Image: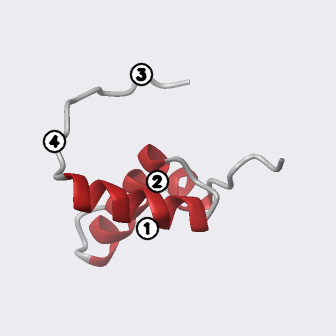
Amino acid sequence: MADKKRFLLRLDPELYDALERWAADELRSVNGQIKFLMVEALKRAGRLSRGKSQTASQEKPPEA
């Protein structure tokens, strides 16, 4: 597995709560949801090639 960068992200509680609910609806962690949203936004903006990060958009949460 490739190394991953770590960084601190500060969010106000209201934003975090909304992300947490959205992530739960899609059976993702908050971290996974943020990564998914960022990859999709970068692709739409043309700043990430569509084939470059297929894993992020194809990630499926583990089945319970």
Q: Which of 8 and 36 is in front in this view?
A: 8
Residue 64 in percent (x, y) is at 83, 47
From the viewer's perspective, tell me whether residue 17 is left or right of residue 7: right
Q: For the residue marked with disc 3, what is the amino acid? A: Asp
Q: Which mark is residue 50?
A: 1
Residue 20 in percent (x, y) is at 44, 56
Alpha-carbon span between mark 1 and mark 4? 28 Å
Q: Mark 3 points at which residue?
A: 3
Q: Residue 10 carries which label?
A: 4
From the viewer's perspective, tell me whether residue 11 is left or right of residue 44: left
Q: Which residue is drawn at 56% across and 24% down?
A: 1
User: Tag 4's secondary structure?
Assistant: loop
Residue 53 in view here: yes
Occupied quadrant, residue 25: bottom right
Q: Mark 2 points at which residue?
A: 53
Up the image or down, 8 lies above or below 18; here it is above
Up the image or down, 4 lies above or below 58; here it is above
Q: Which residue is drawn at 38% across and 68% down?
A: 40
Q: Give the number of callouts.
A: 4
